[in-house]
Amino acid sequence: MIDAILQDLVGRHREDYKRGQVATYIPELARVDPGHLGIAIAFQDGRIVTAGESEIPFAIESISKTVVLALALLDRGEAEVFRHMRQEPSGDAFNSIVKLQTGSAHVPSNPFINAGAILTTSLIAGGSPDEKFDRILRFMQRISESPGLDLDRETYLSEKATGHTNRALAWMMKSYGDIDGDVEDILDVYFRQCSIRVTASVLAKMGRFFAAGGVLSTGERVLTAREARIVVGLMATCGLYNGTGTYMVNVGVPTKSGVGGGLLAAYSGVGGIGTFSPALDEVGNSVAGQNMMREISEKLGLDILLPTVRKENLG
Ligand code: GLU
């Protein structure tokens, strides 16, 4: 049943990309084929069902912020992570600098806007940028049960060459004393974490991990339930930039987007869904991905707002 649902979705949403634009701020994102469309669902019992281009690699971009937040919570604990950052939607663009100057206490609104994400990256343990990135990559491989994950070097070099707004955010936080350490080193790790290559299947497995409360499909617990709840709660409230409110009304499932065209959704107690379609709407979220998430949420009745689980469609 679920197999047929996914095939049907991919068939009907093939043309959605025409209503969006691929990200163009670096050539590596601009030259992606906008017609790619893939979806994968990873169930708690280990089963994975896919349709379309579920194995085509693309840059994880902002979806990495979920993984790095989880690792920062393990490295530093909740109190330290949220000492200089809040857990509230910002209502501003993902890379906005405004709240750093005018908001309460000058701190980032949440770990999923760029300012908060860079601050989170600054908290990752390790003696050098290489060691910090290596820890992030290995942690991502572990929680997505995808040992082959790696960096896309061209994307990383482009992110690094063009990321001046991120530099401005980081230096501003440095000037307020909110981040410790060498700013360029921290940004270097941030640019690399955004440039890891994933697929819709990998995102589905990552989503499954968070949906299971931080437990691998083997049953091994990696995060406490509280730590997983922080990540999933922030996905629900801040996961799609300033399009999160509309998305929650339409889909009702905690999700994180990235400008590479991916979406990662965590369906608590059921599993994870990953989608890939690179054409984005005006706030930076995948057009086809959002449409497919809306339909799958309706078909499976799993949204967190008014759940009416349709077990017959899960088999
Ligand atoms: N590398 C991008 C940035 O930091 C990520 C953007 C995104 O996916 O939202 O600006």
Image: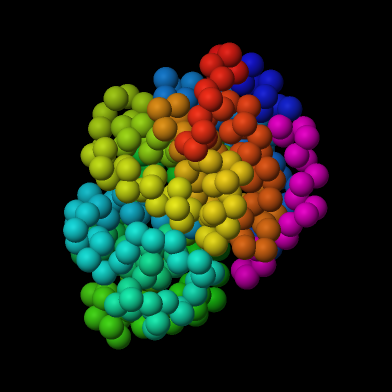
For this view, does 99 lie left or right of residue 251? left
| Quarter assignment of residue 185 | bottom left
Q: Residue at x 53, y 41 (%)?
A: 252
Residue 265 in sight in this render: no
Count every numbered label the image shows and give the total. 0
| Quarter assignment of residue 141 | top left
In depth, the one of 61 and 227 nearer the eye is: 227
Give the magenta part as a residue range.
Answer: 9-28
In depth, the one of 279 and 201 nearer the eye is: 279
For this view, does 245 lie left or right of residue 171? right
In depth, the one of 267 and 168 nearer the eye is: 267
Quarter containing the N terminus: top right
In depth, the one of 309 and 282 nearer the eye is: 309
- Residue 144: x, y in percent? 41, 38
- Is residue 16 inside the magenta stretch? yes
Q: Extreme front residue here?
A: 306
For this view, does 10 lie left or right of residue 122? right
- Residue 98: x, y in percent? 46, 80
- Relative height, residue 154 to residue 215 (above, below): below
- Is residue 21 inside the magenta stretch? yes
Q: Residue at x 33, y 54 (%)?
A: 69
Q: Residue at x 64, y 21 (%)?
A: 3
- Relative height, residue 174 to residue 273 (above, below): below
- Residue 143: x, y in percent? 36, 39
